[in-house]
Image (tube, rainbow, N blue to C red):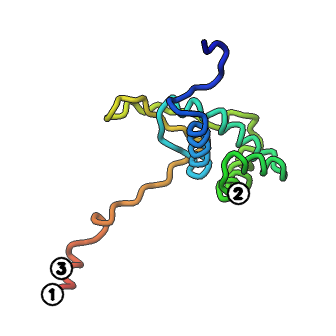
């Protein structure tokens, strides 16, 4: 029986699960928001919170601990130079889960896992909408 066993298995063996958590937390730190299933987001949220706390703490030992988990110098650099200092005055609760509804293919509950200070970038108009037909027609004649 699984009494008092913390954590979800998510249908993966331990190495695959660890790689999944590492990749999801790295993507969250890099992009500020990720779209994933609710179960994965709930499993990754405490790990991301701990890593951001390491980023707040700073220091070489904290940096090495984060690098051992994330395995990407670029993500660790972003964690310690950008994300950690942004949350320096916040005592916890760095992430939020925003429910999106079911995924079309299998009805899995989808969510955004995002940093609480995440601001979406303004979207640009598509390239086809920006080009003007009159200018192209005038250029051909």
Question: In the picture, residue 3 is in which quadrant?
Answer: top right
Q: Residue at x 40, y 29 (%)?
A: 108
- Provide residue 77's location: percent of width, then percent of height: 70, 57
Q: Residue at x 84, y 53 (%)?
A: 60
- Provide residue 134's location: percent of width, then percent of height: 20, 75
User: On the image, numbered disc 2 is attached to which residue?
Assistant: 77
In the picture, measured across the screen, residue 128 lies left or right of residue 140, that is right
- Provide residue 103's location: percent of width, then percent of height: 36, 34
In the picture, measured across the screen, residue 99 lies left or right of residue 70, that is left
The residue at the far bottom in this view is 141
The N terminus - image quarter: top right
Q: Secondary structure at mark 1?
A: loop
**Does residue 103 lie above or below 5 as drawn?**
below
Q: Categorize mark 2 by other alpha carbons within 10 Å: few (<14), some (14-19), many (20+).
A: some
User: On the image, numbered disc 3 is attached to which residue?
Assistant: 137
Q: Secondary structure at mark 3?
A: helix
Q: Residue at x 42, y 29 (%)?
A: 109
N-terminal of the two: label 2 or label 3?
Answer: 2
The one of 54 and 85 positioned closer to us in this rendering? 54
Q: How many marks?
A: 3
The one of 118 and 46 positioned closer to us in this rendering? 46
The C terminus - image quarter: bottom left
Front disc: 1 or 2: 2
**Are the residues tagged 1 and 2 within 8 Å (C-beta)?**
no
Residues at marks 2 and 3, CA–CA distance in whole angstroms: 49 Å
User: On the image, numbered disc 1 is attached to which residue?
Assistant: 141
**Are the residues tagged 2 and 3 within 8 Å (C-beta)?**
no
**Are the residues tagged 1 and 3 within 8 Å (C-beta)?**
yes
Question: In the picture, residue 57 is in which quadrant?
Answer: top right
**Does residue 20 lie above or below 72 as drawn?**
above
């Amino acid at each position: 029986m699984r009494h008092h066993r913390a954590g979800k298995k998510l249908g993966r063996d331990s190495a695959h699960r660890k790689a999944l958590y590492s990749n999801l937390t790295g993507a969250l730190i890099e992009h500020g928001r990720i779209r994933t299933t609710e179960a994965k987001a709930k499993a990754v949220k405490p790990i991301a919170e701990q890593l951001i706390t390491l980023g707040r703490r700073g220091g070489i030992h904290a940096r090495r601990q984060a690098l051992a988990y994330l395995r990407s110098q670029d993500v660790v650099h972003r964690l310690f130079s950008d994300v950690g200092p942004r949350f320096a005055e916040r005592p916890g609760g760095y992430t939020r889960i925003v429910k999106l509804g079911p995924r079309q293919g299998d009805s899995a509950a989808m969510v955004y896992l995002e940093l609480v200070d995440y601001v979406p970038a303004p979207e640009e108009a598509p390239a086809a909408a920006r080009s003007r037909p009159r200018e192209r027609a005038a250029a051909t004649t």
